Image (spheres, rainbow, N blue to C red):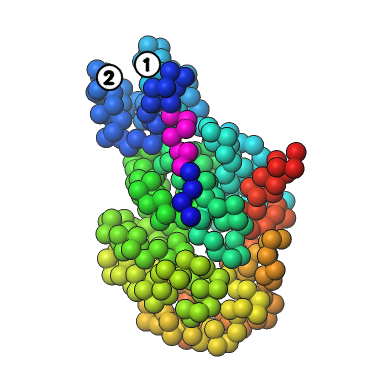
Amino acid sequence: MEMMDNSNRDKENTDGIRKTDIKSLDYGEVQALLAGMGEKPFHAGQLYQWMHQKLADSFDEMTNLSKSLRRKLSESCSYTCLTPVQVLTSQIDGTQKYLFRLADGYVIESVLMKYQHGNSVCISTQVGCRMGCRFCASTIGGRTRDLTPGEMLDQVYRIQKMTGERISNLVMMGTGEPLDNYDNAVKFIHMLSDGHGLNISQRNITLSTCGIVPRMRQLAEEGLQITLALSLHASSQQKREELLPVAKKYEIHDAVEACRYYYEKTGRRITFEYSLVGGKNDTAEDAKELASLIHGMNCHVNLIPVNPIKERSYVQSGKKVIADFKNKLENCGINVTIRREMGRDIGGACGQLRKSYLDKEKKE
Ligand code: SAH
């Protein structure tokens, strides 16, 4: 399953000298880098602010740093700045889908959603995904490589800079499995919530996982205040395996148990995501079984009408079936919301914009 990892491709200059990926360095690491170059400590503050607060596109913009320091930096460091290839805007609710190109040519997808309580960005954590969830478009071509912390951050930075809108919330629900890129995902969360950067509250950050149990437990020990969301999508082991191959490795009860542990350690309410697939997981028995599976937990269930993709034959549950499912859970005392479909007019499910772009590119 492991694919070639090209993540270091953009980090060598033409002489084959390895460059430092400066946007993936945290504040302390930038201080150490500049100290190592014999620079004054306050330049580290200025440099970090240019990258992570003023959201500069390049070293050239950093006009309060001397030309010689800027030259030294560009000789020894690569500077991640994503290039927008396509932006789609919903006429219904203002949701925007972004297709970005990375330095090595791969493309990734991010989404901006506007809510009353603020602007939320959904980021990708990998180029492609190897988890194989049956109804998901992001996993069809497999995983190409992990994203660096800088590439995760820059999805937020480009969107904030292009729209001029402050981003207050973040969900790691785009392409990729964040816990399959664990160290980079955790570093990204630290840097995004750092006061030297955008200072987005950890309580406004959600990490969604298909259920890599050992990593969920490890995350519980990080001392973070983020929300953990588990993509449950079924209430029995057998049904879950059919939709999420990863469930063969990590059993449903172990995944739910890891959520209980996360709550014990962090005090943060768990979110369960449940994509309703017509005729697969949407009966009254499924709802009853789900209620007993998560009984007594401080949690919240997010029902998502499955977004049909052309490569698979899954269909949405009917409106009444969805409402009945919700009522059944509520009668068991469970908090439930039906996820509002955002940007219905700008095309579909997670990973579909990228997929259609890649398909078109192949044809041409
Ligand atoms: N890998 C992580 C995060 C990315 S997917 C995870 O599995 O949680 C974000 C959410 O969207 C997951 O709950 C995923 O199962 C769901 N999802 C993906 N494709 C979907 C589709 N076509 N319809 C409905 N939900 C989908």
Is residue 167 toward the left or the right of residue 97 in the image? Answer: left
Q: Image quadrant of residue 101?
A: top right
Residue that mark 2 sits on: 37
The answer to whether residue 4 of the structure is visible from this angle is: yes
Q: Are marks 2 and 1 in contact (CB under 8 Å)?
A: yes
Neighbor class of circle 2 (other Cα within 10 Å; few <14, some 14-19, many 20+) is few
The answer to whether residue 93 of the structure is visible from this angle is: no
How far across and down, in percent of the image, does residue 91 sit? 72, 51
- Identify residue type, mark 2: Met
Q: Give the extent of the magenta segment.
A: 5-11
How far across and down, in percent of the image, does residue 207 sit? 43, 57
Tell me what residue is drawn at x 43 percent, y 85 percent: 292
Tell me what residue is drawn at x 61 percent, y 44 percent: 98
In this rendering, the answer to whether 169 lies above or below 270 is above
Q: Image quadrant of residue 135?
A: bottom right
Is residue 351 toward the left or the right of residue 10 in the image? Answer: right
Tell me what residue is drawn at x 43 percent, y 65 percent: 211
Residue 191 belongs to magenta span:
no
Determine the secondary structure under disc 1.
helix
Determine the secondary structure under disc 2.
loop
Neighbor class of circle 1 (other Cα within 10 Å; few <14, some 14-19, many 20+) is few
Q: Identify the disc placed on residue 72.
A: 1
- Identify residue type, mark 1: Lys
Q: Image quadrant of residue 199?
A: top left
Tell me what residue is drawn at x 51 percent, y 74 percent: 240
